[in-house]
Image: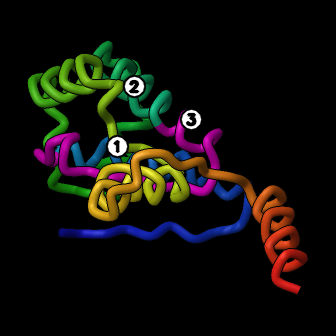
Amino acid sequence: MKGIVLKASAGTGKTYRLSLEYLATLLKGESYKDVLVMTFTKKATSEIQERVIVFLEEMYRDKGSDLYTNLKNLYPNIDLSYGNIKKVYYEVLDNRDRLKISTIDGFINNIFKNVIAPYLNIFSYEIIDDSDNLEILLKCFEKIV
């Protein structure tokens, strides 16, 4: 298992780079089923998914010269043949709803829903945001005191 962590200030191209890394991973032969991308915001997750599809479309239609250059700079031995790009392009299009690109919160919620809740026999629950959490904690504290 290999992990890549991109850490940089706002506006430095993290989403672009993460999209390239995801694309490169698929082009190097990894299945979309084995790749997980986590970000902080829903906006970034949708941008990454959209960019990966747009990047593949551009490369499939042979209009992504910058993409070829950037991918080759990152991974000199990457297979950017038309056949490989076509295979990955159709795999991503056919499975776009199954790509594992999510927020960190979404990933943790998914683990809770599919692993922890069934293990603890919790079948009904609600995930609340921080402001609701504070309100509930204050009410509990008032009842205790």
Tell me the distance, in whole angstroms, between the alpha carbons under discs 2 and 1: 14 Å
The picture quadrant where one finds residue 136 is bottom right
Give above or below for 50 relative to 19.
above
Amino acid type of the residue that numbered disc 1 sits on in the rendered structure: Lys
Residue 85: image location, x then y, percent: 19, 27
Q: Nearer the viewer, residue 65 or 24?
A: 24
The part of the chain drawn in magenta is: 28-48
Residue 144: image location, x then y, percent: 82, 82
Look at the numbered discs 2 and 1 and tell me whether their residues touch, using CB distance below 8 Å: no
Q: Nearer the viewer, mark 2 or mark 1?
A: 1
Give above or below for 76 relative to 142.
above
Among numbered discs 2 and 1, the one appearing first in the sequence: 2
Numbered circle sitting on residue 100: 1
In this picture, residue 138 sits left or right of residue 126 = right
Q: Which residue is mark 3?
A: 47
So how many labels did they put on this image? 3
